[in-house]
Amino acid sequence: MNKKVFILGAGFSAGAGLPTQFELTKEIFNPQFSNGKYSSEEYSLFDTQKKLINLLKNDFGIDEKSDYLLSLEDIYTPLDRCIVENSNFRSFQPEELLNLRQTIDAILILAIKAKSGLTKKAEYIEKFAKYLIQKSKVRAKDKRLDPIAVITTNWDILLDLALRDQLVRVTTRPGIIDYMCYVSSLKNDDSIKPGLQALTEGEFIVKLLKIHGSINWLNCPKCQRIFIDFYRRVIDYGVFRQAKCKYCSKEYDDHDEHSPRLRPLLLMPTFAKDLSNFQTKLIWRNSGLEISEADELIFIGYSFPLADFEFRQLLFRNISRNTKITVVLYDKKDPNKILTNKNKSQLNLESAEYRYLSFFGGREIKILFNGAEKYIESLE
C-alpha cells in the first residue's frame, strides 16, 4: 500500500478565510487588543503593544496604512537574538524583551482565533477530513497498515475541528486525532489521548503533526505535557487566565502561587526557532519518520519559504530518493497550468515554484496551480 504524506501551509486555510502572514502583521496595529475588553489590569500585557507601535512608527516609519510592512521574521529574529544575547532591541531594554515577545505572540494568537471564529464554513476542509478518516480506518483492522499522514505548518484548528466533527460520526470503531506526541485533555475528555493508547484500545488514529504548534494547545513548563481542548477560547487560558497544570499543581496545594501555569506552545516565524521543548522534538522526529516512509509527498498551499530552513533540512535528511512530489499552489490567472522539473528556466527566481524545483532537483515533481479546494475535490 502506497503511503501519502500531505504537507499543509497557510494557503490550505486561506480559502476558508484565515489570514495570510501579511494580514497577521497588520494585527500588531489593531487597537482592540489594547483597548476595550482587553484594557483591564488582568490584560495589562497589551500596554506593551503601544510601545511596539511607537517603535515601528518612529524607527521604521511604518504604521497600519503603510504599503510595505516588516515581515514577522524581520521582527521576531532580531528580537529572539537579543533575548539570547541579553542585549537591547532598539529602545527596549533586555528586561523588557520577554514581555514584548509575549505581547506579539498574544496579538497573533488572538487574531487567528478571532478569524477562525468568523471564517466561512469550508466544505473542502470537511471533505479532506472525511478523506483522511476513510484512509486511516484501515488501521483499525490491521495496525501494520499506515497509508496516510498530515504534517502542517499552520496554527489554526480548522482541520482539527473538521476531523473531530467527522470522527464522532464514525459508528463502527472509534477514532481519534493523533498529534504524534504526549497529549492530555484540558478537561476530562476521553476522546483526547495519545495515539498509542488509542491503538491498544482498538481505535484507529488520524495522524496530524503540527510542527509549529497549535492555538488549541497549552504546555506545562514543568512536566511538558500538552493539554488540548477544541473549545475556541482555550488559548485564553494560557495567554490571560494563567491556567494551572492539573498534574503538577497537586504538589503545591499549600502554595498555589508556585504552581506551574500553562502557556501556549507555538513556534513563531523567526530564523531562530527554539526546538528545545521535548514535545516539539517528538513531533519533529515523528515528522521526519513520516517523510522517510512516504511514497508521495503532497504540498498544499505551502510556499516553501527560506525562513523554514529547519523544515527544509528535515526534508533533505529524510526524503527517499524515489518519493514522488506533488505541489498544489494557486494562480488565479492560470489555474490550469502544470509545471514539472523541465520548466525551471522559465520561472521567476523569487517564486514558490522555483524554490520547489530548485530544492528537489531531478526528482519527479509536478506543480499544480488550481488551489487547495479544487485539488481536494479530485481526491478519491
Image (spheres, rainbow, N blue to C red):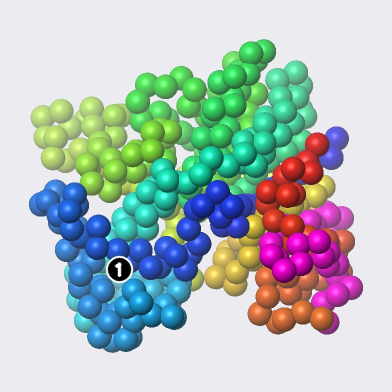
Amino acid type shown at disc 1: Phe
Which SS class for mark 1?
A: helix
Considering depth in this image, is 125 or 296 the residue closer to the camera? Answer: 125
Residue 306 shown left or right of residue 289 in the figure: left
Considering depth in this image, is 375 or 247 the residue closer to the camera? Answer: 375
In the rendered image, residue 257, in percent from the top left (x then y), is placed at: 13, 40
What residue does disc 1 label? 29
Q: Residue at x 77, y 47 (%)?
A: 294
Residue 164 shown left or right of residue 143 in the figure: left
Considering depth in this image, is 243 or 84 the residue closer to the camera? Answer: 243
Q: Residue at x 48, y 50 (%)?
A: 155
51 over 102 or under it: above or below: below
Q: Quadrant of residue 74?
A: bottom left
Q: Residue at x 30, y 68 (%)?
A: 29
Residue 63 shown left or right of residue 69 in the figure: left
Considering depth in this image, is 79 or 342 the residue closer to the camera? Answer: 342
225 over 112 or under it: above or below: above
Part of the protein shown in magenta:
321-345
Q: Is residue 341 magenta?
A: yes
Residue 216 at least partly seen:
yes
**Magenta stretch, overall SS:** loop
